[in-house]
Amino acid sequence: MGLTAQWALAQEYPRAATNALTLFENVRIFDGTSKNLSDKTNVLVVDNTIKKISTDPIPVPEYLSVTHINGNINGKERVLMPGLIDAHVHLYMATLPPELSVSPDMMTPGELEQNAEKAATDTLMRGFTSVRDLAGPVFKLKRAVDAGKVVGPRIYPSGAMISQTSGHGDYRTPADLPRTPTSPLSPGEVLGIGAIADGVPEVLRATREQLMKGASQIKLAAGGGVSSSYDPLDVSQYTEAELSAAVEAAEDWDTYVTVHAYTPRAIQKAIRAGVKCIDHGQLMDEETAKIMHKQGIWLSLQPFLDDEDANPKEGEKREKQLLVAEGTDIAYKLAKKYNLKTAWGTDTLFSAKLATRQGAKLAKLVRWYTPAEVLKMATSANAQLLAMSDLRNPYPGKLGVVEEGALADLLLVDGNPLENINLIEDPAQNFVVIMKDGKIYKNILPASAEGEDSREQVN
């Protein structure tokens, strides 16, 4: 390379600004939005950003090729795609034993933290580079991940789910009532999983407490739930004034409120109060779908079916679970009919086995969507939902796409997921490279496929 060319490259990649450089060569790109793959392409990542995408060879300064390069990864026409995003997780509770759903104090805080750290690492190694955590004390875990002390995805935390007395987040028993000003907090409140708040002042306090801890968005329980014992599925929770108070407090911090809600009444009341996202919505009707479309409300929907991922309940909870499963098909059809802004998440709780099926739960969306639509939902669409945190967004930058200037959260897939969506069910085998924020956490390509600088999985 001539001196003039070297000088030009040095201006583009100054030494002081460059800590790491990775070049993906001969890959075909699913960019997070397109229905088709690109032709053979090269992608250059500098630090944590996608610097250049080109079908032509991408030159790099000679001085970087030795001292600062992660490696030239020859994809051999494998598919490079954005990291996956799960819009509804509970890292603190996803893999806990079922008995802890009623007695979370059976494990020490240290044991609970270790379990959450492992859940975070396993999530990233399944190819999920960002998650929206919608109930749980994950603020410390998020800080540890961001500092590089724990391997895990980007975490958008809500903190405690705010619930009224008798609501979906109230896991006390009648023996714990009535609550008085001197009553002790329930175990779930002590841990920070939920926050029971009644009336506008208490809702404001609970909302502001989560924002003070670092919430990127706020979650309230606005309707009945399957796993809770004392609220029928049909009930609507919180008054419009209470919901509006949470919305105003969140908007004062330049972010938004999402609510747990299934039924038309619960959903429509939340929308009137200014809520921007509905999590679940399986029992919605056509009128509700029309309102959501008109007002641009997000529907964060999960494929809850009566199948191998159902985690069956007993008694009344089983009856509620079957109602939700029956409504799932209707909800997805309405979402498609009215072109709703639709996000995807898993909402796994208290099942280490089901947590491993994160990719499989995404793949089952082909019941309603094409593989390209499925992957778009779990990348660029979910990223748009995350970005609604606005000034409370903990990770400014563009996620969910492979384009110049976007953050470098990338997967190299051994196969074409647009043709075979089931590839994402086995990330250990099929995700051969996992990169988050420009750092390679997994690389199982043989040395002959990527050049001299081989990498192993980061634990």
Image (cartoon, rainbow, N blue to C red):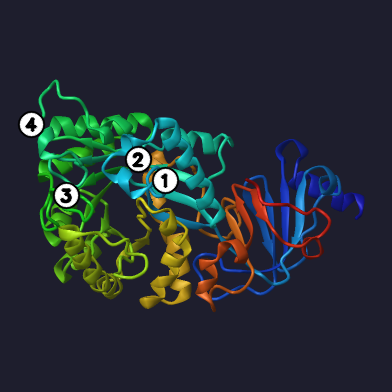
Q: Which of pointers 4 and 3 lies earlier in the amino acid sequence?
A: 4
Looking at the rendered image, the disc whose residue lies closer to the viewer, 1 or 3, is 3
The answer to whether residue 380 of the structure is visible from this angle is yes
Q: Quadrant of the C terminus?
A: top right
Disc 4/disc 3 C-alpha distance (Å): 17 Å
Disc 1/disc 2 C-alpha distance (Å): 7 Å
Which three-letter amino acid code belongs to the residue tagged 2?
Gly
Which three-letter amino acid code belongs to the residue tagged 4?
Pro
Q: Where does label 2 land, which residue?
A: 136
Looking at the rendered image, the disc whose residue lies closer to the viewer, 4 or 1, is 4
Q: Which of pointers 1 and 3 lies earlier in the amino acid sequence?
A: 1
Disc 1/disc 3 C-alpha distance (Å): 22 Å
Q: Where does label 4 land, which residue?
A: 178
Taking the spot 52% from the left edge, 67% from the top edge, the residue there is: 424
Q: Where does label 3 land, which residue?
A: 229
Q: Where does label 1 land, which residue?
A: 91
Among the 4 quarters of the image, the one containing residue 391: top left
Q: Do callouts 1 and 2 mark residues in contact (Cβ within 8 Å)?
A: yes
